[in-house]
Amino acid sequence: MRTVIKWSVMALVLVGVIAGATALYGVLSDKYDSGGLMAPKEFQNGGGNIGASGNEAALGDGQQTALENEAANGGENNTDGQVNSDNEENKPVDGDTSEQAEPKPEITMTAPNFTVLNNEGREVKLSEYVGKPIVLNFWATWCYYCKQEMPDFNEAYKNYGDVNFVMVNVTDGVHETVSSAKAYVENNGFEFDILFDTEGDAVDAYEVTGYPTTYFIDANGNVVAYATGMIDYETIVKGIEMIT
């Protein structure tokens, strides 16, 4: 009788372990392998980067927002309001690369502006890239999944010359430095330029809490889609198609 009870308990423990492992795998797979693109949601107001309407970036120190920069050039922006999280546009899309065009979300939001440093140490703003579609990626060399997706971003960079690739390195000066980031890019032969967020301005503007994170911004400076976690080449192309 004791033997039967013993084996029954062991069986229940084994089932629990398997169930827990399966659940953990599912969470990690969704976070790092799904590569799903999502429509933009209103940023949390606590960061001071998006107003209550969710359409205009409120930046200090006289910085010009992407919306203002684009308006000065005679363009138009969609300022219809906040995206409802229950809309179909907010559901992740799969990695299908068929010829059927992915519909653009009816509601977009203006991309928050920020200031970072280029390879020469000069300050540049995101608004300087408005006028062409933008792929904005946040990455670091200590981030395993960031490095896994880098070759795909480099390939997309070579194949889409009409798109600005804004590869923002999270340069905190402790875990990541300008020299370590430059060495990594040079050693791997990546051709895109990198920008250095030494003051955390870009990370704060987009309230990035995990890496990698990627945003797809149209030529008018509107965020059309974003992805958290590692994405592959097909998903990058899908995002580019949504902004071109």
Image: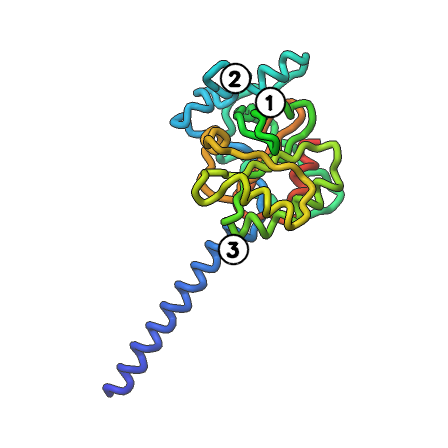
Question: Label 2, on which residue?
Answer: 63
Judged from the image, the secondary structure of the residue bearing numbered disc 1 is helix
Residue indicated by mark 3: 29
Q: Which residue is mark 1?
A: 127
Task: Give the Cα distance between marks 1 and 3.
Answer: 34 Å
Indicate the position of residue 50 as horizontal and vertical percent values. Answer: 46, 23
Res 110 quadrant in image: top right
For the residues bearing labels 2 and 1, Cβ distance under 8 angstroms: yes
Secondary element type, mark 3:
helix
Q: Earlier in the sequence, mark 1 or mark 3?
A: 3
Q: Amino acid at mark 1?
A: Ser
Secondary structure under tag 2 reads loop
Residue 135 vs residue 17, the one in the foreground:
135
Residue 194 is left or right of residue 200, and the answer is right
Q: Earlier in the sequence, mark 2 or mark 3?
A: 3
Residue at 54%, 51% (x, y): give it. Answer: 145
